[in-house]
Amino acid sequence: MPKPAFPADNPHTKEKEALGRALFFDARLSGTGQMACASCHDAELGWGDGRAVSFGHGFQPLPRNAPSILNAAFKTSFFW
């Protein structure tokens, strides 16, 4: 895969990468403070959740599973 393209007015930096990583794993950003992006997008499960349907806050079942975010830089639309 080629490296993802970054906008000319918003180039990649190591600091932005570190911030993104910190935010991805920080559960304090959720409504309940209990779930991070990494709660459903698990590196050990191909960046998905490995479930037929995902769980939301309070372990309530959702209507679909968490898709993999692998190669998300190359996607143009998301279901959210």
Image: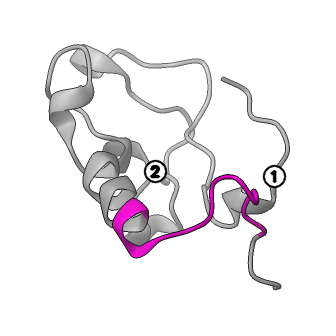
Tell me, for residue 49, which label it has, or none: 2
Q: Which residues are magenta?
A: 5-16
**Disc 1 marks which amino acid?**
Lys
Q: Residues within 10 Å of mark 2 (few under 14, many from 20)?
A: many
The residue nearer to you, when weighing 78 against 23, is 23
**Disc 2 marks which amino acid?**
Asp
Residue 55 lies left or right of residue 51; in this view the side is left
At 37% from the left edge and 42% from the top edge, which residue is drawn?
A: 37
Residue 19 vertical position relative to residue 12 in the rendered view, above or below: above
Percent from the top left, x then y, of residue 56?
37, 22
Q: Residues within 10 Å of mark 1 (few under 14, many from 20)?
A: few
Percent from the top left, x then y, of residue 2?
82, 84
The N terminus is located in which quarter? bottom right
Q: Is residue 7 magenta?
A: yes
Residue 47 lies left or right of residue 18; in this view the side is right
Between label 1 and label 2, give the one nearer the viewer: 1
At 30% from the left edge and 46% from the top edge, which residue is drawn?
A: 23
Among numbered discs 1 and 2, the one appearing first in the sequence: 2
At 73% from the left edge and 27% from the top edge, which residue is drawn?
A: 79
Q: Is residue 51 magenta?
A: no
Tell me, for residue 75, which label it has, or none: 1
